[in-house]
Amino acid sequence: MSEVVKKFMYLNRKAPYGTIYAWESLEVVLIGAAFDQEVSLMFMDDGVFQLTKGQDTTGIGMKNFSPTYRTLGDYEVKSIYVDADSLVARGLTQDDLVQVAWEDWESGEEKENIVEVVDAARVKEIMEESDVIFSF
């Protein structure tokens, strides 16, 4: 019996702190990746703030889990997308986002940064290519 690999898209629309959505999404992403599914993430609306550099949570008394995003490549996550319109609406650019590296240990293929800013047409394509979409 052959294994069926599903394309799981995790859609992140909420700010990183103030609710449990961002943290729960990250946990589910790690579980999906651990089970060898094809995992990708999409950040839209206030979800784009989850990938911003230099987050400091000391003033709100919550643990800063944002460094975990930089390790996603180690879990075979190869695709992280950010909606360009959401960035612009919040006064952000790709330079404001963390970089996530990825390396295939078997082939030696490497990408310095798998975080890709995409337009609305590409967002639609990516979602249509996904077998399952989890929205947080």
Image (cartoon, helix red, strand yellow):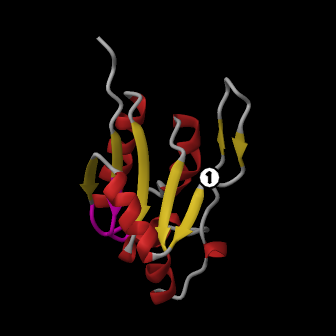
Front residue of 93/14: it is 93
Image position, residue 110 (x, y; %): 71, 41
Q: Residue flagged by tag 1: what amino acid is it?
A: Val
* Mark 1 burial class by Cα count in 10 Å: few <14, some 14-19, many 20+: many
In the rendered image of this protein, does residue 18 appear above or below residue 127?
Answer: below
Residue labelled with disc 1: 100
Q: Does the magenta stretch include residue 126?
A: no
In the rendered image of this protein, does residue 31 appear above or below residue 17?
Answer: above
In the rendered image of this protein, does residue 78 appear above or below residue 34?
Answer: below
Front residue of 126/65: it is 126
The quadrant of the image that shows the N terminus is: top left
The quadrant of the image that shows the C terminus is: bottom left
| Secondary structure type for disc 1 | loop
Q: Can residue 62 be seen in this view?
A: no
Residue furthest to the top = 1
Q: Which residue is drawn at 52% across and 64% down?
A: 51
Q: Is residue 128 left or right of residue 56?
A: left
What is the count of numbered marks?
1
* Residue 55 sits in quarter: bottom right
Q: Residue at x 72, y 51 (%)?
A: 112
In the rendered image of this protein, does residue 74 appear above or below residue 68?
Answer: above
Front residue of 16/92: it is 92
Q: Which residue is drawn at 62% across and 52% down?
A: 100
Q: Is the magenta stretch mostly helix, strand or loop?
A: loop
The magenta segment: 10-20
Image position, residue 133 (x, y; %): 27, 53
